[in-house]
Image (cartoon, grey):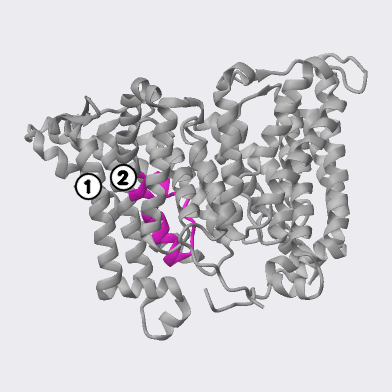
Amino acid sequence: MAEWFQDNGLLLGLALLDGLSSAGLIFLVAVGLNLVFGVLRIVNVAHGSLYAIGAYSAASIGIFAGSLGLPDWASIPALFLSAALVGAVLGPLIERFLLRRIYAQEEVVQLLVTFALFMILEDVQKLVWGVQPIENRVAMQLLGNTDVPFGADFIPYTNYQLFLLPGVAIVTLVGLAWFLRRTLTGRVIVAVTTDREAASAMGIDAAKIYLLTFTFGAMLAALGGALSSPTAALVPGIGAQTIVLSFAVVATAGLGRIEGAALTSLMMGLGRSIAVYFEPELEVVVPYIIMVLVLLVRPQGLFGVAETRRV
Amino acid sequence: MSTTQDPPRDPMARPARLMKRYEPILAILLAAAMITAAILAPWLRFVLTIALAKGIAVLGILLLLRAGQVSFGHAIYIAFGAYVVAFLAPTVNDAALLLALAAVGAGLLGLVIGAFVTRYRQIFFGMLNLAMSMVFYSLLEKLYAITKGSDGIRVEIMPIAGQALDRVAYEWVIFGIALGIALVVAILLRLYLSSPMGEALAGIKTRETRLEFMGVPARGVLLSAYVMSAVVGGIGGALIALTSRHVTPQLAYWTSSGELVFIAILGGAGGVLGPFLGAATYELVRIYAAASFADAWQMILGAVLLLVILFAPGGLWGMAARAIGGRGR
């Protein structure tokens, strides 16, 4: 065992760091999906497209800002700004003109509507940004590196992935928990999630809450994409990859508690990055293995509450 | 949610009943139209064989939809059937035998996976199926030594039931086999759906608990439907492999599973002809869109799907039902 650590310790350290930063991104996307499903009861397949569009927009806006001669530090607020923009434009558009028409429909139909939207947005994204990889790493380079002590050695790691990504995820987690439990709007959202009909009967404007939640969920997806854009080159297909991973997180965590999504994201992020370094073939499989194991033991998900059986 | 709602009354009930009576005639007409099209334009023969293969697989989706469950991972059975053909073709070297093997193999895989996933309902059922198919996809893609990864495996033309054939004859026979299997499976499924087992399946959608109060083992009913859906998926996949003669992991990707649900809804879940109507339309729109707008074919398909869902509930089958129902009034 000790010998193994001697040989693989650094790899393990790198895997842990990678896992932490990717868990942050996974959490941002998955918690948005979870929130939207909780309130609208729609599994939004197009959530992955919002992630991809968020990433591409952030890269484009960043490159544009650079061409205007704006200072490098502007690239970081630009990431958040572009995410807010994507969410604020696409969110209401999708909810108002598409989802609102199908709330009364069957679950299959709702799923398929968002799948159709995914197909459309996937091509929109290819038409706008093309199929060549797009890169804009300014934000990551700007923040520099830190030597992370690990045992006797140091691992050089980017501050962007070490502090900014997990930091944003933690702020989102804490902020969201506070928002949902301590503010009026947040409590109304929880009320609608728990019992839509009773909430409406109490005079809650469900339509407004739906619009608000969907827009907020869209912003979170776009934020995940935007923050991921400085760490890797953007290629078509990132939306499709992201959404299946987020599905796995949401189903594993169970519906409701956002802390569940955070813990699951951490498990899957770490599991995946450990696989990358030690068994690369398993990388894509690990999240699903975790999901299947969790659901075998807890059929309603880690933090989900079992539904009462209808008679 | 603690409140319960009965499903809304189906406005399509009367046209649907009428359609049930016309179904055999429409099936013959559809088959005749497909044969005519395949004779007139040889390239359509290929497209329609694929459409028939997908239609057969979508019949399985239809079965699960009857129970109110959506599988977002049924492409695993298509891919499994296709890879059975690709792996065993060098040793078995007979298309008819390979079809049977693919059906049995997919059925066994369906039994194993089904025993697990039928414990779950709704989103968990859908997502677990998705997970299974994505695991299979990753294995196909990563185990390059066995599967040749995303390059895929070529399938050569092979004898059918002991008869060696040239390319054109081979393609015709596969088309004929696909049409024959489609008819047989559609008839069997129609009988199944109107049998007590089939009716119990619909009971899972409305009130599963009541079903169990009556002594019907709901999970067993769903599992048997699931295995059947896996078998037809395997057959569809084997036919696709025999027709396109090239299998890739893409067959198992989640978007391929979405495509199957897409076809089911496009065709309409009302009758066993819906999947074939849907699959033929889907493939033709896809071919034309890809030829005319190479970068936007997905967008066109997505738009078609949205239009159907928003303005033609019940899919193409429902549209046909309204047309016939309207005339009968």
Between A60 and A43, the one lying in front of the other is A43
**Residue B258 visible in the displayed image:** no
Number of on-image labels: 2
Q: Amino acid at mark 1?
A: Gly
Image location of residue A159, percent across then percent down: 18, 35
- What residue is rendered at 26% in x and 48% in y? A83
Give percent across and percent down for residue A217.
Answer: 35, 57
Dividing the picture into quadrants, the one containing residue A177 is bottom left
Q: Residue furthest bottom?
A: A202
Same chain, marks 2 and 1? yes
Hey, what amino acid is under mark 2?
Gly
Residue A201, compared with residue B155, is above or below; it is below
- Residues under numbered marks 2 and 1 in contact, where contact means CB atoms less than 8 Å apart: yes
- What is the secondary structure assignment of the residue under circle 1? helix
**Which residue in the structure is indicated by mark 2?**
A24
Q: Nearer the viewer, residue B93 or B286?
A: B93
Q: Which residues are magenta?
A: A24-49
Q: Is residue B257 left or right of residue B162?
A: left
User: Label 1 marks which chain's residue?
Assistant: A
Residue shown at the point (81%, 36%) measured from the top left: B103
Specify the quadrant that holds the C terminus of chain B. bottom right
Q: Considering only order in the chain, which callout, 1 or 2, is on the residue closer to the N terminus?
A: 2
The answer for which chain carries disc 2 is A
Instruction: Indicate the secondary structure of the residue bearing disc 2.
Output: helix
Q: Is residue A11 left or right of residue A253?
A: left
**How far from the left and from the top, in percent, is residue B273?**
78, 51
Rendered position, A254 above or below B87: below
Q: Position of residue B27 (x, y in %)?
A: 84, 49
Residue B221 shown in magenta: no
Q: Which residue is mark 1?
A: A167
Residue A211 can be seen in this image: yes
